[in-house]
Image (cartoon, coloured by chain):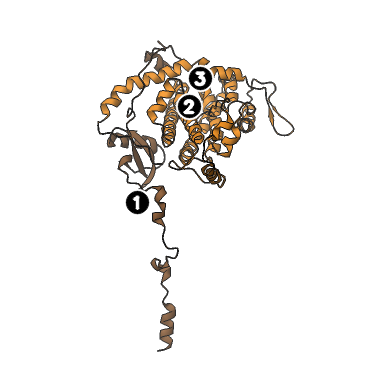
Chain colours: A brown, B orange
Amino acid sequence: MIKSLDPRITRAEINLENTIEPLRDLDQWETYEVFHQKKRGDQHMHVGIVHAPNAEMAFIFGKEQFGRRGLSVNIWVVKTRDVYVSDYEDSDIYDTVPEKNYREAGGYKVMDKINKFKKGF
Amino acid sequence: MYGNAYIDPNDKATAMTAGEDPKKLEEFEARIARGEKIEPMDWMPKEYRKQLVRMIEQHGHSEIIGALPEGTWITRAPGFRRKLALMAKVQDEVGHAQLLYSAAETLGKSREAMINDLITGKSKYSNVFNYPAFTWADACIIAWLIDAGAIINQVANAKGSYGPYCRALDRICTEESFHLKYGHDNVVTLATGTPKQREMVQAALTRWWPPIMHFFGPSDKISNHTEILMRWKVKMATNDDMRQQFLNMYVPKIWDLGLTLPDENLKKNAEGKWEYTEPDWEEFKRVINGGGPCNAERLAVRRNAEERGRWVREALNTTESKYIVPLA
């Protein structure tokens, strides 16, 4: 048994030569993506992942991991495998025409026409 | 907190890019040179992935094992506020391990595999945590000076090339600044306290000085592939440069408190470089390979925690669980 400087370890009666079976796949569960909101009205921000066996535990771990200091009012968790993602290899799907001012407010200037129209009145 | 990653000096630098597509390699190196970050699904040389996994994983293990010497003093911290602060610090360290393991996972190594490699002794962790914290003052010296060393290392690495590691480090560095202030406050309290307190903190400092000098890893003269790792921005500063930076920032602060360091040759020379007795690298190798005063206990404690918690983890697991590599 380990006689440690740490009384908690001595109390745990640990054999120095203990051997264990290796951890198997999924021993640490799957992952959840965590979204954190600092204050009411802010957008939730993606902050990272936690490993958890279910959503409730993912929430508890997410709260400890990302909400233990600073402001927090809300956390969302969602299974990583439920996130639908686009592939960076396909990022050309976001390509478009370089000139897009037809869908900007600044693309529509009518004062010239109006003034000209008024003058000719 | 954490120590510099230990890289086997026998790895051959020339073998590091063997078999790589020269065009892809050139493109990859150009991206890094432009200051772009490499993200999980991007092409990367095998050796880049391997070194990063090793480094991030070791960093994560160091956070987990580092919680042990400091945790020693939670039950006997002097006063309620210091107990609260120490618990918060230890919780932060374990939280840092979670962030780091997640970053390493994006490179394709599962958390189970990392934990297995830790508890079988295959993966290393920072050598300093193989030494015991004999007194409360040891815990104070760790919190101040080991965390100070860690910050130098982590601030440098946060400017590295791998996106997920940089993001984890940014979050970690913010928290480490509390650790450093907390540690300094503790050391100052002892150093400006009663003669007994001063004696205690001086003894702890003397004990910890050799491990602190080992902290940044062997001298650059010994390592033969620093150059390529620095070009890939896996390593951001040489071991000796980080050691110099540490000495420059902290030796004056130590001397300000009237404390002494157990190295007669320690001084700043006319060129502004610190001179010191070369640390005992044989001792460093002996300890990192399992021969230190606490190696066996640290790993036995981790194995025990994994083993006794296993039934809980298994009971919570569901058959429909399915692991996929984290996204970012």
**Which label sits in the foreground, 3 or 1?**
3
| Alpha-carbon span between mark 2 and mark 3 | 10 Å
Label 2 Cα crowd, 10 Å radius (few <14 / some 14-19 / many 20+): many
Mark positioned earlier in the residue sequence (2 or 3): 2
Q: Where is residue B145 in the image (x, y as percent from the top left)?
A: 56, 28
Instruction: Name the chain under label 1.
Output: A
Above or below B160: residue B240: above
Q: Is residue A1 left or right of residue B197?
A: left
Q: Which residue is drawn at 71% across and 34% down?
A: B272
Q: Nearer the viewer, residue B141 or B16?
A: B16
Q: How far apart are marks 3 and 1 (CA)?
A: 47 Å
Query: Is B326 above or below relative to A15?
Result: below
Residue B194 vertical position relative to residue A35 in the rendered view, above or below: above
Q: How crowded is mark 3: few (under 14 residues within 10 Å), some or many (20 or more)?
A: many
Q: Going by the picture, which residue comes out furthest to the right?
A: B270
State which quadrant residue B229 falls in.
top right
Using the image, name the chain to which the residue with label 3 belongs.
B
Disc 2: which residue: B62
Element carrying mark 2: helix
Q: Nearer the viewer, residue B52 or B3?
A: B52
Q: CB of mark 1 within 8 Å of CB of mark 2?
A: no
Amino acid type, residue under disc 3 in the picture: Asn
Q: Which residue is drawn at 40% across and 16% down?
A: A9
- At a point 40% along the width and 56% down the height, the residue shown is A94
What residue is pinned by disc 1? A41
Please check whether the numbered discs 2 and 3 fall on a single chain: yes
Residue A69 x/y as whole percent: 41, 38
